Amino acid sequence: MLFVGYFEGIESERGLEWRCADSLSLRTFLGVAMDKRVPDHSSLSRMRTRLDGKVYDEVFRRILAIVESKGLLRGKVEGVDSTYLRADASMKSIVRKDTGDDYAAYLKKLCEAEGIHDPTVEDARRMDRSRKGKKTSNEEWQSPTDADARIVRLKDGRTRLGYKAEHVVDLETGAIVAADVYTGTTPIRRTLRPSLEAARTNVTAARSDSDDDDDAPPPATSSEGTREIVEVVGDKGYHKVQSLLELRRAQYRTYIPAPEQKGQRHFGDKGRMLAREAFHHNQARVRRAKAKRCFGNVARSSSAPSPLRARPGRIVASDFAVATTSESGTSSTPRQ
């Protein structure tokens, strides 16, 4: 039923129950006879909240094992990208962290501090439009219903509560090999390496499951110095000299274009000669024809917008774990 909800874009659990009960084809797909009732919507709610994130990680790897058995998993060239997902929480409900006041009560106090006696709603709005230094920051505001959601600016320019979803794609086949959800303010330098390591682990586990249907965990990887080199493609947002150096040491070959910068680059506080070498080697690879083909694959793999919305306390359990062909996640809680 979770697959049906994802493929048909049904976010409501009650709506999903009705859809499965009403459709003969879906009853056949689910194996539910006409004289039987489909699982209740409350069962889906319990599954979202009770199952541990490791369960969804295992499901994700089992699906990858099927992909591997069909010859659609390479793991040699990987593209990484991220996007913001709206949280299932409203900006109108945010409260101050220090006092617990909502936005209306906060504006009323500001009006009283300006000498406006018994301010009306219109007085508060007028004052809010004209006051200087107005901003809504995560240091001062939070959602009372979803403490993990962060105030982020979406690609269309709107400010909303949301999360950052990051996924890794096998560019040779288009298969999603890793996906995760982070808090909206987590910097890229803290998400890139964990996402790539998760992709490497998932590919290894999928190949192990494809070879034999054993529940034993995958064998431990060898030291980083002898690991297989994986080529990584990303956009300019992922270009950080420290990240390039870190990925090089971890046996990743990067193809990440550098953003335009005026003046001369300095590497003294970023690793000196090793950082300089990692930067220039990455730049040389970006200029190759192979890199241009990879960038085209990244653009195609991340062009379709995701219809999903992150829900408080159950961000990945239902919406992302079943999504193996879009921007999705595989753990039950966002990483900090």
Image: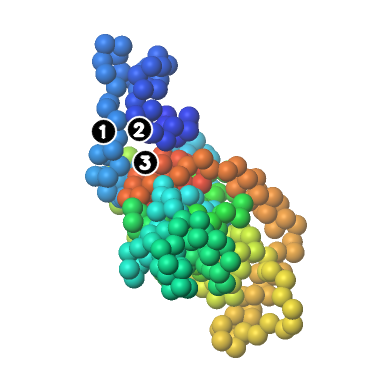
Q: Residue pushed farthest front?
A: 117
In this rendering, the answer to whether 67 lies above or below 98 is: above
Q: Which residue is mark 2?
A: 13
Element at badge 3?
loop
Name the secondary structure under disc 2. Answer: helix
Q: Tell me the tag on residue 318.
A: 3
Q: Are marks 1 and 2 in contact (CB under 8 Å)?
A: yes
Circle 2 residues within 10 Å: few <14, some 14–19, many ≥20: some
Front-most of 24 and 217? 24
Q: Which mark is residue 42?
A: 1
Q: Amino acid at mark 2?
A: Glu
Name which residue type carries label 3.
Ser
Calculate the distance from the C-alpha at mark 3 to the C-alpha at mark 2: 10 Å
Which residue appears at 35% of the width and 63% of the height?
A: 101
Vertical comparison of 90 with 264: above or below: above
Q: Earlier in the sequence, mark 3 or mark 2?
A: 2
Q: Is residue 231 left or right of residue 116?
A: right
